[in-house]
Amino acid sequence: MEPDAGRRRAASLGARLVSWVPAWVKGRSSDALKARARALLGVEPWPDLAVRHPLFREARYRALRKEAAPFDVRKPNKPVLERGHQASYLIAGLLADAGVRTAFQVGYANGRYLFYLSRMGIECGGTDLPALETPWTAIPPGALDEAVRSRLLEVDFFTLTPPRLLAAWGDARAFPLDVLFTEATFETLLPWRASGVSVPKYGAMSREERQGLVEEKLPAQLAELQGCARNILLIEPEPRAGGAGRVFEACARRLPGLAYSVWRFRPPFDRLFRLSPSVPTEQAVYAYVRDSRVTDALGAYAERV
């Protein structure tokens, strides 16, 4: 029997067993317990990639995690996911340890990274697609300071220009910014999985159009913006996933003034940067830096490939 067929058969049997559980038992069970049961029965993988580590038992993390509760996304019969909070805290702490004072996130998220960055004392901003294009990224009311909200641009990264970025920041003295970074932003354009595209507008494109964006437009866009940031960190699919290594090497050729290196997160942090609970593909850090202090800080959590 093929492995996939075996998994489908096991999932079908597991789903049947779940359907036999009395309603009163389900009603008294927590969402986390129900998700654990579905995972044990092979119905679906455990959805959270969070890890146990002393970093996330720190008093600072516990306090910020409590304050960040508005970012929690609640779904029927699903536990609140911790992975995004842990990843955001790790990256924000890493940048703070590197002495970063200003950071710009290129992402399609709900502002959680910016929350943790701002609470670490980092002046930050970013890009987000308009709400109609990514409705799951709505920022909870009051979750971000007004200054941070004013630097969050509803614009596709591929149309972002240096003047637009400067105007949003409002202070030319802050430029170049210390860091521009992504986390699982360009994965939607890379064929790292058999099917599926995270952002619908890109899913409507042909494979060739998406390929053109990452292989031609992305390197050119980073080259245009390189004067806006001293260092660029792209946390995206690992080199062997969907040709990612080739794409980000092409970006390095367009950024000759920045030292290029590739890093892989060490366990258990590698789990935080997997792209999906059901797919083993991990993310790597593609670093283009002027300041070695950035990769020195990264070395606390990752190793150079």
Image (cartoon, rainbow, N blue to C red):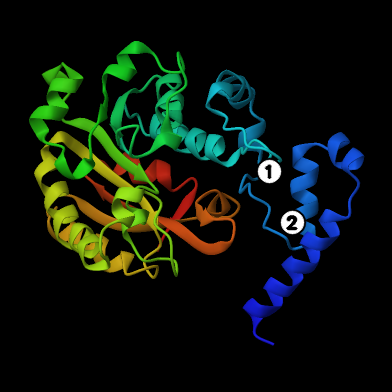
Q: In the image, residue 239 lies at what x, y percent? A: 36, 66
Q: Residue at x 85, y 60 (%)?
A: 17
Circle 2 residue:
39
Nearer the observer, disc 1 or disc 2?
Answer: 2
State the residue in front, 279 or 237: 279
| Disc 2 packing (10 Å; few <14; some 14–19; many ≥20) | some
Indicate the secondary structure of the residue bearing disc 2: helix
Q: In the image, residue 234 lies at what x, y percent? A: 32, 49
Confirm or deny contact between disc 1 and disc 2 (CB under 8 A).
no
Q: Is residue 189 above or below residue 100?
A: below
271 left or right of 295 in image: right
Q: Is residue 114 above or below residue 157?
A: above
Q: In the image, residue 79 lies at what x, y percent? A: 69, 39
Indicate the secondary structure of the residue bearing disc 1: loop
Under mark 1, the amino acid is Arg
State the residue in front, 90 or 298: 90
Q: Residue at x 74, y 63 (%)?
A: 42
Q: Residue at x 75, y 41 (%)?
A: 32
Can residue 298 be seen by looking at this rendering? yes
Under mark 2, the amino acid is Ala
Q: Is residue 300 above or below residue 98?
A: below
222 left or right of 39 in image: left
Circle 1 residue:
52
Q: Quadrant of residue 245?
A: bottom left
